[in-house]
């Protein structure tokens, strides 16, 4: 058996393992589009390596043509997945046009037996895709995670490797076929297996990291309102309290809930109640600044931590929310009128944890309820 077939077999089984891994990740962990795109990319690669082996064994131009088309499809799907993961629009028009041109040119070269031209078109196209993928992978407003950094480096290495293949193949034009492709095949055999496996490992790590981030978010976020839950609030409060102490700046806590929420649920159903909770959460989120914390503490009760804000300023913010909530219109209950009550407190020198502040904010909230609801109460005024 020739060394080329052995290498192709290794790459085929790598593609098969990656297809299974990505397929399992897609089916069982959220059916994310980019994971499906990568699974399909490795599926196309499996067909590619089978056709490549057949082309080498039988010296078939048809099978080498299939190989070229599958490489184009596989590389394009990698880039599509990177775009989908980044939340960016996939440039389908340009990818289809460029992919069809690359597939047509390389297929024609394969059919007429012009291996150097095929060896220029396919690696050149894939190299450009990898450069684009690396640029798209770069985060816009945060740092690289370790798996992302590894995949970024592998994309760049793959791009450099493909460009090296293009240069090697170009130098072989005009020489005897065996002589012109000897160096090309040596470079391909030495470099492709390690880079191909490296990209696969990095891609798996990225998917695993995304999954860990997703599970962590689900543990800390309320699925109905998409704000933090009580656990997420407590974890965020540790950092917020420590920062306020370190820089000697104020920190305000607001505890609030919807007045008559049980009556709303009983009179109009849980769909209206859920809509009220989502609308209330959106109002709270829009009212605060980026970096402030909004959480659903349970039921219809929400908590907010406002950095660099004293209790009076926090009360002013909540007054605006209190006025706006009456304008919410609920599906299925258009005539239902919503109100909310708010309890506000400020961090003191003796506060050691979130519960110390929650106790005072709850007391202020209860005072607001006793005084007639639909109002904002500051703990010092209520004490």
Image (tube, rainbow, N blue to C red):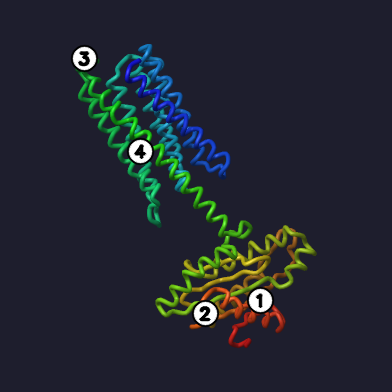
Instruction: Measure how far apart labels 1 and 3 are at the Cα level.
Output: 85 Å
Q: Is disc 1 in contact with disc 2, using a CB cutoff of under 8 Å? A: no
Give the left or right position of residue 339, taking residue 189 as reference.
Answer: right
Instruction: Measure how far apart labels 1 and 2 are at the Cα level.
Output: 24 Å
Which is more foreground, mark 2 or mark 3?
2
Which is more foreground, mark 2 or mark 4?
2
The residue carrying pointer 2 sits among few (fewer than 14), some (14 to 19) or many (20 or more) residues within 10 Å by Cα, namely few
Check the image and name the residue furthest to the right: 267
Lower position in the chain sequence, tag 2 or tag 3 = 3
Asked if one can make out residue 289 in the rendered structure from this viewpoint, the answer is no
Pointer 4 residue: 130
Pointer 1 residue: 341
Lower position in the chain sequence, tag 1 or tag 2 = 1
Q: In which quadrant of the rendered image does the N terminus lie?
A: top left
The kind of secondary structure element at disc 2 is loop
- x and y, in percent, of residue 41 in the image: 46, 33
Which image quarter: residue 126? top left
Of 200 and 170, nearer the camera is 200
Q: In which quadrant of the rendered image does the C terminus lie?
A: bottom right
Q: How many discs appear?
A: 4
The kind of secondary structure element at disc 4 is helix
Which image quarter: residue 51? top left
- x and y, in percent, of residue 219 in the image: 57, 57
- x and y, in percent, of residue 287 in the image: 54, 70
The kind of secondary structure element at disc 1 is strand
Instruction: Measure how far apart labels 4 and 3 are at the Cα level.
Output: 31 Å
Pointer 3 residue: 176
Lower position in the chain sequence, tag 4 or tag 3 = 4
Which is more foreground, mark 1 or mark 2?
2
Pointer 2 residue: 351
Q: Is disc 1 in contact with disc 3, using a CB cutoff of under 8 Å? A: no
Q: Is disc 1 in contact with disc 4, using a CB cutoff of under 8 Å? A: no
């Amino acid at each position: 058996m020739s060394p080329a077939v052995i290498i192709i077999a290794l790459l085929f089984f790598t593609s098969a393992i990656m297809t299974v891994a990505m397929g399992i990740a897609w089916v069982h962990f959220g059916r994310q589009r980019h994971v499906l795109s990568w699974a399909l990319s490795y599926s196309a690669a499996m067909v590619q390596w089978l056709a490549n082996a057949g082309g080498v064994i039988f010296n078939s131009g048809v099978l080498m043509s299939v190989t070229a088309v599958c490489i184009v499809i596989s590389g394009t799907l990698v880039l599509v997945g990177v775009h989908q993961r980044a939340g960016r629009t996939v440039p389908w028009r340009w990818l289809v046009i460029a992919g069809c041109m690359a597939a047509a040119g390389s297929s024609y070269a394969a059919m007429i037996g012009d291996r150097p031209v095929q060896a220029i078109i396919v690696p050149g196209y894939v190299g450009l895709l990898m450069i684009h993928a690396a640029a798209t992978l770069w985060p816009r407003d945060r740092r690289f995670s370790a798996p992302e950094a590894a995949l970024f480096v592998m994309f760049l290495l793959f791009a450099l490797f493909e460009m090296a293949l293009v240069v090697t193949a170009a130098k072989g034009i005009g020489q005897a076929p065996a002589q012109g492709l000897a160096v090309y095949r040596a470079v391909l055999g030495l470099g492709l297996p390690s880079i191909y496996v490296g990209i696969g490992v990095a891609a798996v790590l990225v998917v695993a990291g995304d999954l860990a981030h997703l599970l962590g978010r689900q543990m800390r976020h309320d699925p109905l309102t998409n704000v933090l839950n009580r656990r997420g609030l407590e974890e965020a409060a540790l950092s917020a309290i420590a920062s306020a102490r370190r820089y000697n700046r104020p920190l305000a806590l607001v505890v609030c809930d919807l007045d008559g929420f049980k009556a709303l649920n009983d009179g109009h159903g849980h769909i209206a109640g859920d809509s009220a909770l989502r609308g209330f959460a959106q109002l709270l989120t829009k009212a605060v600044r980026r970096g402030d914390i909004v959480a659903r503490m349970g039921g219809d009760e929400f908590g907010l931590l406002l950095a660099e804000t004293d209790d009076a300023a926090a009360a002013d913010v909540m007054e605006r929310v209190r006025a706006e909530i009456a304008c919410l219109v609920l599906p299925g209950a258009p005539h239902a009128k919503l109100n909310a009550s708010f309890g506000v407190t400020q961090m003191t020198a003796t506060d050691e944890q979130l519960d110390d502040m929650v106790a005072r904010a709850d007391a202020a909230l209860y005072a607001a309820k006793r005084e007639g609801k639909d109002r904002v109460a500051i703990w010092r005024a209520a004490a």
